[in-house]
Image: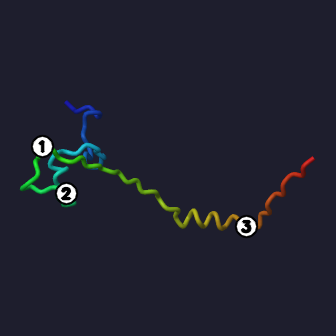
Amino acid sequence: MSQHSSLKSGGGDSKHRSVLKRYEKLKHLVKKDEWNAEKDSVYKIKKVKQVKFKVKKQAGPKEEKEGAEGGKTGQAATPPAPKK
């Protein structure tokens, strides 16, 4: 018997999670030197904000060439219609 497609878990690492587990929070705080294992409690941990960055694609050379060639083709711009 096969598994339904909605129940499959594929690529769980690629999904952004805003809520972290306790050990993930501790790992993040240790990197920033905001948590000391000897003196700080595990139960009252600071909140850790996870920010998801979205990278915009830059205009490639193909798009730049198309815009530059528009003026070189010799097509004259249409003059504005006269006002009455």
Q: Which residue lies under the disc numbered 1?
A: 43
Label 1 environment density (alpha carbons within 10 Å; few <14, some 14–19, many ≥20): few
**Mark 2 and mark 1 residues within 8 Å of each other at the beta carbon:** no
Which is more foreground, mark 1 or mark 3?
Answer: 1
For residue 30, above or below residue 19? below
Identify the residue position indicated by label 2 in the image.
34
Residue at image location 11% in from the left, 52% down from the top:
40
Model colouring: rainbow
Q: In the picture shown, does residue 16 fall above or below 29?
A: above
Question: In terms of sequence position, does the residue under pointer 2 or pointer 3 come before the other?
Answer: 2
Alpha carbons under labels 2 and 1: distance apart = 15 Å
Query: Which residue is drawn at the image coordinates 19% and 30% (left, top)?
Result: 1
**Label 3, residues with CA under 10 Å away: few <14, some 14-19, many ≥20:** few
Q: Which label number is shown at residue 82?
A: none
Question: Residue 4: where, in percent of width, then height?
Answer: 26, 31
The reply, left or right, for residue 55 in relation to residue 7 is: right
Name the outermost residue toward the left.
38
Residue type pointed to by label 1: Tyr
The residue at the point 17 percent across, 47 percent down is: 45
Q: Which of 12 and 73 is in front in this view?
A: 12
Residue located beneath label 3 in the image: 73
